[in-house]
Image (tube, rainbow, N blue to C red):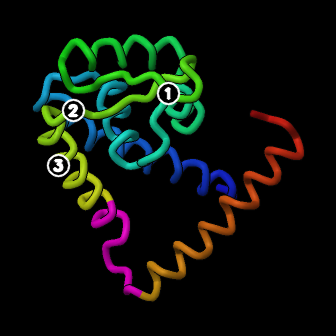
Amino acid sequence: MTRITDFLMNLRRMMKLHEALLKDICEEYGLTLIEANIISFLYSNPGRDTARDIVELRMLSKGNVSQAVELLIQKSLLKRTPDQADRRIIHLTLLPAADPITKAIEDSRRQFQKELFSGFTKEERQLYYQLNGRIIENTKAAVKRRELL
């Protein structure tokens, strides 16, 4: 296989591992995968708290996010708050009832990193983060040049 194929296959494997860990949380708390993704996103990204942010950064469908947000509100895990300056913007806030879920998400995140970086030294992890940061910036620039998204 080519290096690019290996790279892309490994990205997919990492996503599958992340989803598998989230699915365990879904089963425990009676959530769908997209609901768990929304809770995880809001917990992990303070200041990025709109459905639009979730759609854009998690690359999920607008309709699915909208439907899942409504279900999370019905489950009393999330609330909507209109923006003070622009009433068209709706902020999403996790409610205290979501605390056990966010704790499980944090535990899952630690497990994910433990699995990915097994056998890595602290220095190797730091190097990975530096190189990955550069790859992220290069990817953003390439996408912007080609207007893919």
Quick check: 41 above or below 80? Answer: below
Quick check: 92 above or below 142? Answer: above
Q: Position of residue 30 (x, y in %)?
A: 15, 22
Mark carried by residue 83: 1
Identify the residue under disc 2: 95
Question: Where are the magenta residues, as a range?
Answer: 113-122
Question: For the residue labelled by badge 1, is the local secondary structure a helix, a strand or a loop?
Answer: loop
Question: If you read the primary sequence from the N terminus, does the residue marked by circle 3 or circle 1 appear first?
Answer: 1
- Classify residue 40 as left or right of residue 3: left
Task: Name the residue: 45% across, 22% down.
Answer: 82
- Classify residue 145 as left or right of residue 105: right
Q: Position of residue 62 (x, y in %)?
A: 54, 17
Q: Position of residue 34 (x, y in %)?
A: 36, 25
Judged by depth in the image, the label closer to the viewer, 3 or 1, is 1
Quick check: 95 above or below 67? Answer: below
Identify the residue under disc 3: 103
